[in-house]
Image (tube, grey):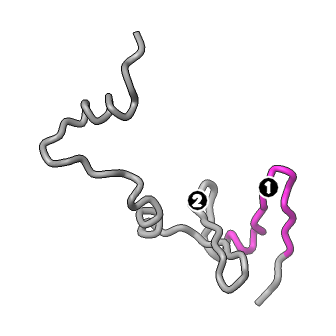
Amino acid sequence: MNPYSMRISSKGQVTVPKALRDRFGITPQPDLEFRVEGGKLVLAKLTPEAAVKAIRGIVKRLPVGSDVDDYLRGTRGPRCP
């Protein structure tokens, strides 16, 4: 395994070396995730399945027969004049 050193900018940004972007097919604006595995920080491409899994449970299902407009009014509050 070839080690690559990267520096974190003052904004918390990391540049992935071109050789690694090419090797793993990382293109501009991909979905990536950082996770901890065995005490190490791991950067991984987020697969479409993983993206769905990551947001599962955030969106609540509406009760059968309920109205979407009523739901939105309830979550957003009254409409501004």
Q: Which residues are magenta?
A: 5-21
Q: Where is mark 2, residue-wise?
A: 30
Q: Earlier in the sequence, mark 1 or mark 2?
A: 1
Residue found at x 75% / y 73%? 19
Q: Check residue 12 for magenta coloring.
A: yes
* Above-or-below relation of 49 to 81: below
Question: How far apart are labels 1 and 2 at the CA level?
Answer: 17 Å
Q: Check residue 14 for magenta coloring.
A: yes
Please state the horizontal and vertical placement of residue 46, each as a whole percent of the image. 53, 67
* Mark in front: 1 vs 2: 1
Residue found at x 17% / y 40%? 66
Category of crowding for the residue at label 1, using alpha-carbon neighbours closer than 10 angstroms: few (below 14), some (14–19), many (at least 20): few
Tell me the quadrant of the picture where the N terminus can be found. bottom right
Mark 1–mark 2 CB contact (< 8 Å): no
Q: Where is mark 1, residue-wise?
A: 12
Please state the horizontal and vertical placement of residue 36, each as a whole percent of the image. 66, 76
Residue found at x 87% / y 52%? 10
Q: Secondary structure at mark 2?
A: loop
Query: On residue 65, which mark appears?
Result: none
Q: Secondary structure at mark 1?
A: loop
Please state the horizontal and vertical placement of residue 2, each as a whole percent of the image. 80, 86
Most common SS among magenta residues: loop
